[in-house]
Image (cartoon, rainbow, N blue to C red):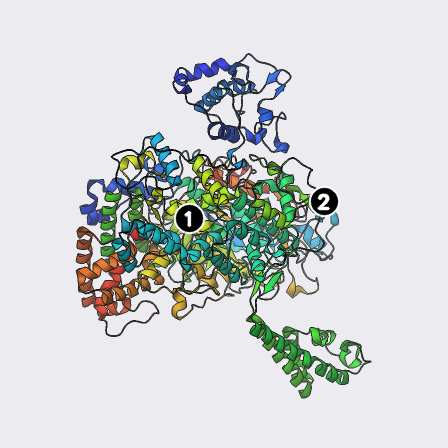
């Protein structure tokens, strides 16, 4: 494992050498303060003792996790076909789900007007796995094989019934767009450990069939009312992963270096003349951009990955823009100190194609997800990396469509209970936490709300979720709004 | 009531020791020093929110503070010993001390002392400053101090307030900025474009005493002025060219945007500007322009996601309209009051739904428009007579065809006249869904999709060539009508339902949780003069409310407007929290000046250009932005205004400046939005290939940033640190990340600008030195120093050598972008200058308004 880049020295020796004539002895001082402000810290904090990233006082206590990889499954995976085995569904298959179970709950308009709600049994086989005996269906064999490393939360519930609000709720704590996302909060609160990569990186992919229209809105990784430097940087699935990373055609790297040296010289003269400390930040900003031009191509160069490692992630790993590729990128970003890595994969919205598409969707996702856990584990990174896998809600235990039209079976959105899994830093491996009722419809025990989940993630990062706040419009906002309890039983 | 405990005030004295007497002489300002403490530490449980109020005690009102109950007085003016509040804040007992030990916000020692001194000084109370009308206080007399400098420090009343404050702080203003820098600053501020070198020369040569003011007048009269100031308003209005959310359909709100630019250019008074945008549709005899103006509140996002419950969308849109209005015209953050009484400001949930009722009366249903259009009714049709005629003709062609088809079908599907086709035995044996659906649909109602699906049956399965021909004519006619229709611009506007909706308070703000409490349109109680409670008899509509917003009854419209203007010039307003003038907002740095400007603004007919002129002709604005280390240490944010503003420009202005420096900028005014350079695949990735970005060609690539097409779910990539155009944004923070540097270094828009700027430089001057100076002036308005010229000149030599060695590199760089390249220009020389111009476009001084 490559050691995480220390905060000092922030300017490498070569960069220093080229501009020593202008910076003189003060170079390191300027660079440090300026870099500090670029790295997601308050400008004034730059003058504080070195090695204190983020805002003062954070983390509140010793963290178990240093970083997070969130494998977000857009569209909502069917909990009752993948993790939450309910023999009752098979027994009731085709019969109307009892009213007392449904209890007048609202659904999306796709089934909101549907009066027939026949129970739909799981569409594939379940088995228990590992020493922990966790239930996983045979659509996810690789995940099943590492069940003892995972912690399943089977009593998740949320409030939104449509995708965009529900995803926004998971990632920002509110259904309507406009609040900072989790990664933005963490960049703001904890700063960055990387000097040449953003603290918060996002990668997106979709199912091969392009079966659903779930869009990746940029507010899924927005900074809301936090300054925009905390927003996630979306790495692209084609071409330069970072926009405008490449020098224009005809400009070599050496020429760029020379131009940036002059730019720094002219800006430094201006700084001395004007006394504006913002100019020092500008100099550092351009220096970091130059470094990023080197570090990002190195980051995306998989040529030194062993065949064994590549094999862990499955056959799609070489395809830029695939979920498998993004999972390997996630590990490489984690190694380089990126704080929050949000990998989003769409295609789980099986309203009418459960019998055909779910299995294919699982094949795309299973090996990369499990491979990432195995890869992190064998490198010792799983000890301080939290991995989360899950969607924005679950899917109805009853059918959307007609029971005789098996090819068009589907399940609608189901916010009332669903399953996610977590692994790594500080989470109990091999644990199944909470449970749904016999129909997989409502939580039966130890409910975990979205805000509880968020409070728990922050806790693992050493943050008291009630104390990471930002004053906006006269109010102290936080990720968990005014709710949320840490689920301590999940913690190792 | 708690058991009485031994009084604990002595603890306070003990804790504070001898520290307090030294500062006790300073008078205490309740609004500035005391209310913020109470608000932050106490209002959460003892504030405006009735539901979470403890011990029925309110500390946000005078009555609560001076309350005496069961012999216990909260605050006894002049008598700290007898004031329960002071005992509570220092009590050593866990069950008695306030704030309670579990509270996140605890009082600091200095704050406790301040509260004690305030009580000792008679505990004066005052209404929150922004809730009382602004009054123009007397302009301070500022003694001119000899020996400061030759330029006047007080040119207008603005300066008198600023200098008076500086004198109190023991600071002196800075001298005036160099003339070139000043012209560049004011040109960028008023028009968003840098001055041309000839304009700089003319100004430098102009020895008239009012040369600067003449420049200001020239800039205020430029059509570029409206384009520059429209940007900030578009951020506030959450303007974009698409709806957002799934499908992200396009809308045509650009006529509204053009209305804004025009209103600013013609200097429409801000009160009319406000009324027309909030309620132009309700004005008596509303003109087409006034209806377009009312599109202001249709600029919000619209969630038409599949499976979405329409009422949920509709209610969220009303919330957005209430809260956007609150932020812009009242400086109040109302969103909390959706679910409960505001925690800090005296705005109840009832007040919120009274505003909600005002915006709840539009005919919008919450349902998406259907099809590809993002224009959701009500809309105004802006077709030209020719366009309307084209649609009418196309429709007439369809209408003429209908009887012909009907006659044919009466023969083909025999049935009694007047009965639908499906009643014919010949139609009933048609198979499956289609073409039976076709037969079930009246000819007049048939759409393109149904016809296209029915056609193959009659062509291939049961061939009837004559009928197929007829259907094909029908399809062609519908297509022609749709094409004509597509050319018509529909702008979303406001309207008012004939029968008003009943508004009920929504429990926790949930659209499906109506309570039984009705609300009637009214201004918040806080601003209501004593009178009858809101009810059906005095229910306000949108127009009433819009008029109230810009009436003397609302103390905040002028203050918030003046503050936003100041923010645009100086980087921050007097109140830093532009969207919050409430109790938890930032207290104003210059309260008297803010109020003077606000009152003066209203007294002079809400004249926006006059306000801008007043600011930019002040000595305060004209100061140099150079600052000594001591001054920067003392006032790093420049809130005291002892120097001029210096900030990185907004990214849209940086792009416009680059286009202007290259001489590339296309100054066409208004019209549909344009699509300049953007890396391939950005829209496709975000929309799963459903939206394809097709770059414009020719000079549309070089239109001003204001006109760049804004797709809500993935904004233009050439901008950074821009408002997201999703919700109302009144202040965009300036940040610095390496990604920003990559834009101005490598974005094809900037590379092309550098390349074309190089052409301009090579053609515009002779010899390296003159060319370097010309290029430098294009971006900074000043000539380079000898040292600067030395650095650039040395670089130029190296670049020449590089490109002379590498002809292919020279060819590539000198051909960047789509605009034509003059023939006969040597590639290596052109490339060398292109690289140099790119360097100049990235100078800190270039990126900053200085």
Q: Quadrant of the N terminus of chain B?
A: top right
Pointer 2 and pointer 1 on the same chain: yes
Measured as percent of width and height from the top left, residue B793 is found at 18, 58
Q: Chain of mark 1?
A: B
How crowded is the residue under tag 2: few (<14 C-alpha within 10 Å), some, or many (20+)?
few
Residue under the image location 79 percent in, 79 percent down: B424
Measured as percent of width and height from the top left, residue B833 is found at 23, 63
Question: Which residue matches tag 1?
Answer: B612
Q: Is residue A332 above or below residue B428?
A: above
> Is B71 in front, or is A188?
B71
Q: Is residue B665 above or below residue A477?
A: below
> Is A247 in front, or is B20?
B20
Residue farthest to the right, as pictured: B416
Q: Secondary structure at mark 1?
A: helix
Q: Earlier in the sequence, mark 2 or mark 1?
A: 2
Q: Secondary structure at mark 2?
A: helix
Label 2 and label 1: CA atoms lie apart by 42 Å
Quarter occupied by residue A431: top right
Residue farthest to the bottom, as pictured: B465
Q: Is residue B219 left or right of residue B687?
A: left
> Is A324 in front, or is B435?
B435
Q: Is residue B825 left or right of residue B355?
A: left
Question: Which residue matches tag 2?
Answer: B536
């Amino acid at each position: 494992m490559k050691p995480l880049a220390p905060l000092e020295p922030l300017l490498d020796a070569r960069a220093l050498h080229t501009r020593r004539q202008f910076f003189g002895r003060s170079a390191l001082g300027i660079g440090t303060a300026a870099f500090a402000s670029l790295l997601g810290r308050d400008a004034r904090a730059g003058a504080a003792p070195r090695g204190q990233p983020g805002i003062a006082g954070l983390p509140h206590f010793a963290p178990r996790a240093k970083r997070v990889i969130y494998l977000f499954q857009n569209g909502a995976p069917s909990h009752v076909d993948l993790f939450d085995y309910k023999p009752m569904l098979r027994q009731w298959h085709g019969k109307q789900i009892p009213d007392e179970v449904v209890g007048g709950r609202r659904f999306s308009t796709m089934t909101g007007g549907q009066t027939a709600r026949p129970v739909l049994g799981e569409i594939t086989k379940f088995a228990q796995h590992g020493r922990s005996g966790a239930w996983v269906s045979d659509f996810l064999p690789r995940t099943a094989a590492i069940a003892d490393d995972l912690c399943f939360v089977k009593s998740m519930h949320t409030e939104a019934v449509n995708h965009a609000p529900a995803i926004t709720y998971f990632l920002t704590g509110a259904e309507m767009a406009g609040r900072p996302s989790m990664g933005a909060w963490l960049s703001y609160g904890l700063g960055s450990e990387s000097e040449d990569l953003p603290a918060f990186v996002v990668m997106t992919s979709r199912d091969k069939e392009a079966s659903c229209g779930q869009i990746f809105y940029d507010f899924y990784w927005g900074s809301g009312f936090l300054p925009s430097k905390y927003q996630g940087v979306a790495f692209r699935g084609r071409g330069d992963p970072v926009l405008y990373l490449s020098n224009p055609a005809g400009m070599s790297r050496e020429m760029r270096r020379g131009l940036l040296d002059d730019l720094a010289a002219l800006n430094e003269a201006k700084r001395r003349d004007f006394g504006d400390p913002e100019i020092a930040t500008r100099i550092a900003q351009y220096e970091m951009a130059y470094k990023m031009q080197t570090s990002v191509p190195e980051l995306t160069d998989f040529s030194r990955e062993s065949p064994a490692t590549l094999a862990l992630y499955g056959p799609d790993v070489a395809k830029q823009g695939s979920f498998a590729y993004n999972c390997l990128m996630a590990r490489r970003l984690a190694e380089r100190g990126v704080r929050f890595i949000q990998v989003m994969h769409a295609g789980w919205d099986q309203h009418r194609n459960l019998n055909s598409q779910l299995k294919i969707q699982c094949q795309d996702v299973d090996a990369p997800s499990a491979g990432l856990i195995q890869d992190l584990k064998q490198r010792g990174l799983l000890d301080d990396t939290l991995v989360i896998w899950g969607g924005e809600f679950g899917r109805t235990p009853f059918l959307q469509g007609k029971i005789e039209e098996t090819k068009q079976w589907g399940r609608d959105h189901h916010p009332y209970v669903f399953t996610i899994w977590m692994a790594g830093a500080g989470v109990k491996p091999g644990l199944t936490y909470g449970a749904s009722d016999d129909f997989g419809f409502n939580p039966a025990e130890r409910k975990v709300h979205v805000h509880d989940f968020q409070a728990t993630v922050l806790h693992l990062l050493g943050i008291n979720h009630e104390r990471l706040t930002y004053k906006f419009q006269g109010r102290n906002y936080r990720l968990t709004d005014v709710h949320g309890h840490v689920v301590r039983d999940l913690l190792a | 009531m708690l058991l009485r405990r031994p009084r604990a005030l002595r603890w306070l004295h003990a804790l504070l020791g001898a520290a307090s007497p030294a500062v006790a002489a300073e008078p205490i300002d309740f609004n500035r020093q005391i209310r913020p403490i109470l608000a932050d530490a106490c209002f959460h449980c003892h504030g405006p929110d009735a539901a979470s109020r403890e011990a029925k005690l309110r500390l946000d009102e005078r009555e609560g503070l001076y309350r005496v109950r069961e012999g216990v007085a909260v605050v006894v003016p002049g008598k700290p010993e007898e004031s329960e509040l002071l005992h509570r804040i220092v009590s050593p007992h866990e069950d008695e001390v306030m704030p309670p030990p579990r509270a996140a916000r605890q009082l600091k020692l200095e704050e406790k002392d301040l509260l004690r001194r305030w009580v000792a000084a008679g505990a004066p109370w005052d209404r929150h400053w922004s809730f009382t009308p602004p009054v123009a206080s007397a302009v301070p007399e500022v003694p001119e101090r000899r020996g400061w400098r030759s330029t006047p420090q007080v040119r207008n009343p603005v300066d008198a307030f600023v200098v008076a404050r500086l004198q109190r702080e023991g600071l002196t203003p800075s001298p005036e900025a160099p003339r070139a820098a000043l012209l560049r600053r004011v040109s960028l501020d008023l028009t968003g474009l840098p001055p041309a070198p000839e304009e700089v020369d003319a100004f430098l040569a102009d020895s008239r005493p009012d040369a600067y003011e003449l420049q200001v007048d020239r800039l205020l009269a430029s059509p570029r002025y409206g384009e520059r100031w429209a940007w900030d308003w578009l951020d506030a209005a959450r303007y974009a060219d698409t709806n957002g959310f799934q499908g992200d359909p396009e809308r045509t709100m650009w006529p509204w945007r053009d209305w804004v630019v025009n209103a600013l250019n013609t200097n429409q008074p801000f009160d009319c500007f406000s009324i027309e945008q909030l309620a132009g549709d309700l004005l008596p005899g509303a003109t087409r322009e006034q209806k377009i103006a009312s599109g202001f509140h249709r600029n919000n996002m619209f969630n038409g996601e599949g499976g979405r419950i329409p009422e949920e969308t509709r209610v969220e849109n009303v919330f957005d309209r209430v809260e956007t209005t609150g932020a812009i015209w009242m400086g109040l953050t109302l969103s909390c009051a959706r679910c409960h009484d505001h925690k800090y400001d005296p705005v109840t949930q009832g007040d919120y739904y009274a505003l909600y009722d005002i915006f709840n009366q539009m005919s919008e249903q919450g349902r998406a428009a259907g099809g590809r259009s993002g224009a959701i009714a009500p809309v105004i049709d802006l077709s030209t007579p020719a366009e309307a005629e084209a649609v009418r003709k196309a429709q007439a062609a369809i209408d003429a065809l209908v009887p012909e088809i009907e006659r044919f079908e009466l023969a083909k599907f025999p049935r009694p006249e007047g009965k639908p086709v499906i009643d014919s035995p010949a139609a009933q044996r048609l198979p499956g869904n289609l073409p039976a659906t076709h037969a079930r649909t009246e000819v007049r109602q048939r759409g393109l999709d149904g016809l296209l699906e029915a056609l193959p049956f009659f062509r291939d399965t049961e061939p009837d060539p004559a009928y197929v021909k007829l259907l094909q004519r029908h399809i062609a006619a519908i297509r022609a009508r749709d094409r004509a229709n597509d050319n018509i611009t529909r702008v979303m506007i406001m309207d008012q339902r004939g029968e008003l909706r009943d508004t009920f308070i929504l429990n926790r703000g949930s659209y499906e949780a109506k309570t039984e409490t009705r609300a009637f349109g009214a201004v918040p109680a806080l601003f209501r003069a004593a009178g009858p409670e809101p009810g059906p008899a005095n229910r306000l509509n949108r127009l009433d409310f819009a008029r109230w917003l810009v009436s003397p009854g609302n103390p905040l419209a002028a203050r918030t407007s003046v503050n936003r203007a100041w923010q645009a010039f100086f980087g921050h307003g007097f109140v830093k929290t532009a969207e919050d003038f409430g109790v938890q907002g930032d207290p104003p740095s210059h309260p008297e000046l803010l109020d003077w400007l606000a009152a003066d603004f209203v007294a002079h007919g809400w004249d926006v250009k006059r306000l801008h002129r007043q600011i930019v002709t002040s000595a305060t604005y004209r100061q140099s932005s150079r600052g000594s280390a001591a001054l920067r240490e003392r006032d790093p944010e420049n809130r005291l205004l002892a120097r001029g503003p210096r900030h990185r420009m907004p990214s849209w202005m940086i792009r416009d400046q680059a286009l202007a420096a290259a001489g590339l900028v296309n100054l066409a005014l208004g019209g549909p939005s344009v699509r300049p350079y953007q890396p391939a695949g950005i829209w496709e990735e975000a929309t799963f290939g459903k939206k394809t970005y097709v770059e414009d060609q020719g000079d549309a690539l070089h239109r001003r940033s204001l006109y760049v097409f804004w797709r809500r779910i993935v904004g233009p990539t050439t901008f950074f640190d821009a408002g997201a155009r999703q919700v109302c944004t009144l202040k965009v923070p300036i940040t610095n990340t390496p990604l920003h540097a990559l834009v101005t270094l490598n974005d094809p828009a900037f590379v092309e600008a550098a390349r074309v700027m190089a052409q301009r430089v090579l053609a515009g001057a002779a010899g390296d030195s003159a060319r370097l100076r010309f290029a430098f002036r294009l971006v900074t308005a000043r000539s380079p120093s000898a040292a600067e010229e030395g650095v650039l000149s040395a670089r130029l030599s190296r670049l020449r050598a590089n490109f002379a060695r590498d002809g292919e590199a020279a060819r590539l760089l000198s051909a960047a972008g789509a605009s034509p390249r003059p023939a006969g220009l040597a590639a290596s020389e052109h490339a060398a200058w292109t690289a140099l111009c790119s360097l100049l476009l990235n100078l800190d001084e270039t990126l900053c308004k200085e």
